[in-house]
Image (spheres, rainbow, N blue to C red):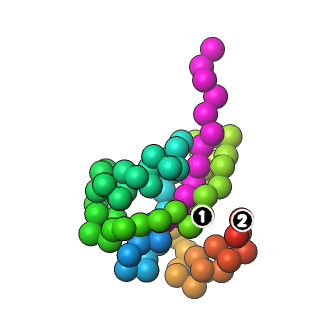
Amino acid sequence: MAKSETHYFYVLECKDGSYYGGYTTDVTRREAEHNAGIRCKYTRNRRPVRVIHSECFETRSEATKAESAFKKLVRKEKDTYLEKNKE
């Protein structure tokens, strides 16, 4: 039987104050990859980055839908979303 994974939508705050939303199954590993400049052009010149938000989902589809919805928001809406969903 296949191993069940948790899927995450996460938000990084970059050195320049911008946000980056992404999908992963391991938030800690993905943050380290961003800070090492691996697999993401957007954050490569905006390091260091730090995870400021993450949500877990049962399926990849749910997590990528949350990521897509976040990316469609304007900055003020992203700020409101993050404030309302503080951990």
**Quarter assignment of residue 9:** bottom right
Q: Residue at x 71, y 65 (%)?
A: 87
Q: Disc 1 designates what residue?
A: 53
**Camera sees residue 46:** yes
Give left or right: position of 51 versus 58.
Answer: left
What number is the disc on residue 87?
Answer: 2
Given residues 87 and 5, the one toward you in this image is 87
**Camera sees residue 68:** no
Classed neighbour count for the residue bearing mark 1: other residues with Cα under 10 Å, few (<14), some (14–19), many (≥20): some
Classed neighbour count for the residue bearing mark 2: other residues with Cα under 10 Å, few (<14), some (14–19), many (≥20): few
**Quarter assignment of residue 55:** bottom right
> Against 13, is 35 above or below?
above
Given residues 36 and 78, the one toward you in this image is 36
What separation in Å lies between label 2 and label 1 (alpha carbons)?
A: 8 Å
Given residues 82 and 35, the one toward you in this image is 35
Residue 27 is covered by the magenta coloring: no
Magenta range is 1-12
Q: Secondary structure at mark 2?
A: loop
> Against 30, is 2 above or below?
above
Q: Residue at x 41, y 66 (%)?
A: 49
Count the marks: how many?
2
Q: CB under 8 Å between callouts 2 and 1?
A: yes
* Residue 16 drawn at (x, y percent): 37, 80
Q: Quadrant of the N terminus?
A: top right
Q: Residue at x 31, y 55 (%)?
A: 36
**Quarter assignment of residue 69:** bottom right
Given residues 19 and 68, the one toward you in this image is 19
What number is the disc on residue 83?
Answer: none
Inspect the image, locate mark 1, and give the three-letter code of the amino acid beneath it. Answer: His
* Residue 65 drawn at (x, y percent): 59, 54
Inspect the image, locate mark 2, and give the three-letter code of the amino acid beneath it. Answer: Glu
Q: Residue at x 44, y 50 (%)?
A: 30
